[in-house]
Amino acid sequence: MSDSDKPNTRLFDLDLLRAIVTVADCGSFTTAATRLHSTQSTVSQKIRRLEEMAGHRLLERGNRDVLPTDAGDTLLGYARRLLALNDEMLEALSGATVALTVRIGVPDDFATGRTTEQLAAFNRRYPQVKLEVTSGLSRDLSASYDRGELDLVLLKQRQNAREAVACWPEKTRWVDSAKNACIELDPLPIVTFPPRGVYRDEMIAALESIGRRWHISFTSSSLSGIQSAIADGMGIGLLPQRAVTMEHAVLPKNIGLPSVDVFEVAMLHRPAVDPMVKELARVLSRVLAQDTKG
């Protein structure tokens, strides 16, 4: 009797393995079904078949995500290796280049400088990894991550707003125009993000806490728009330290504006991600550690 005919031999179907890897990466059966161009019930059936073959429960539904059990973590490690070998075989047979795609979300002020330098260096070090970087407002990045559209994301949030892989304090500064100061105007014009945008509510609460009259003179969803409006004298604003330019004047503490120290930069990725995502997370962690030093 050949090995393949033995009754105890179990051959795991790559289609089933791809299903559980996708569910683990997305943290959701619904999102995984969309990515696999399938239905949620079909994906659930594949997971049940895989659990029957493995003889263990592989996934648990949490409050927010679907998480692997201990047995699931073990299986996922082997599943990723088998799927990678399958892709390598296809590449070798077809001569095509198969790359891992990592989808990253970062706030606008991380889309330049050390962050992009390190992302470019990562690309040179791991040319087989394709990086897709999206920048934007933290509220939009958070929603995209929750829909399974991003693998790794940096978010600005109030401290401990949601669980994260790692967090760093966000240093903010009150800034005015270096050429056309507005701080003495009454009511005080302020430049800010739209409703639900980062810093907006905190700026208003800080000004009202000292009895300062204010009005919103400029609103933009773009960090560059906020920076330009402040520089041109449209009003004062609250910026992360890294986004302050030579055209801005940092307002000193003796001006009397309250410090706003309630924000952090949070890094999120799901527990069962490709090792390359974790390596990229380590690279970005070093950038953030330098950025928040001192």
Image (cartoon, rainbow, N blue to C red):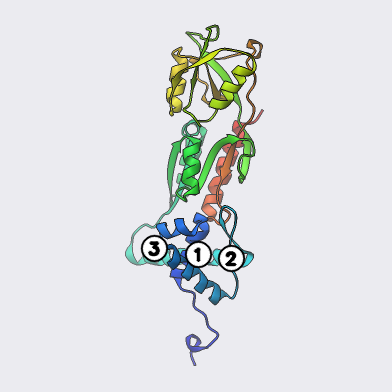
Compared to 67, does 45 lie above or below? Answer: below
Identify the residue at horizontal 58%, vertical 45% (top origin): 282
Mark 2 falls on what kind of element? helix
Task: Return the residue at label 1.
Answer: 20
Q: Say whether marks 3 and 1 touch (CB < 8 Å).
A: no
The residue type indicated by label 1 comes to Ile
Marks 3 and 1, Cα distance to the nearest angstrom? 13 Å
Whether residue 117 is visible here, answered yes or no, is no
Label 2 or label 1, whichever comes before in sequence order:
1
Identify the residue at horizontal 62%, vertical 43% (top origin): 166
The residue type indicated by label 2 comes to Gly
Q: How crowded is mark 2: few (under 14 residues within 10 Å), some or many (20 or more)?
A: many
Judged by depth in the image, the label closer to the viewer, 3 or 2, is: 3
Task: Return the residue at label 3.
Answer: 38
Identify the residue at horizontal 45%, vertical 49% (top origin): 149
Task: Return the residue at label 2.
Answer: 72
Q: Position of residue 287 (x, y in %)?
A: 57, 37
Q: Where is residue 294 in the image (x, y as percent from the top left)?
A: 67, 27
Mark 3 falls on what kind of element? loop
Q: Position of residue 64 (x, y in %)?
A: 57, 52
Q: Say whether marks 2 and 1 touch (CB < 8 Å).
A: yes
Mark 1 falls on what kind of element? helix
The residue type indicated by label 3 comes to Ser
Residue sitting farthest toward the bottom: 1
Marks 2 and 1, Cα distance to the nearest angstrom? 9 Å
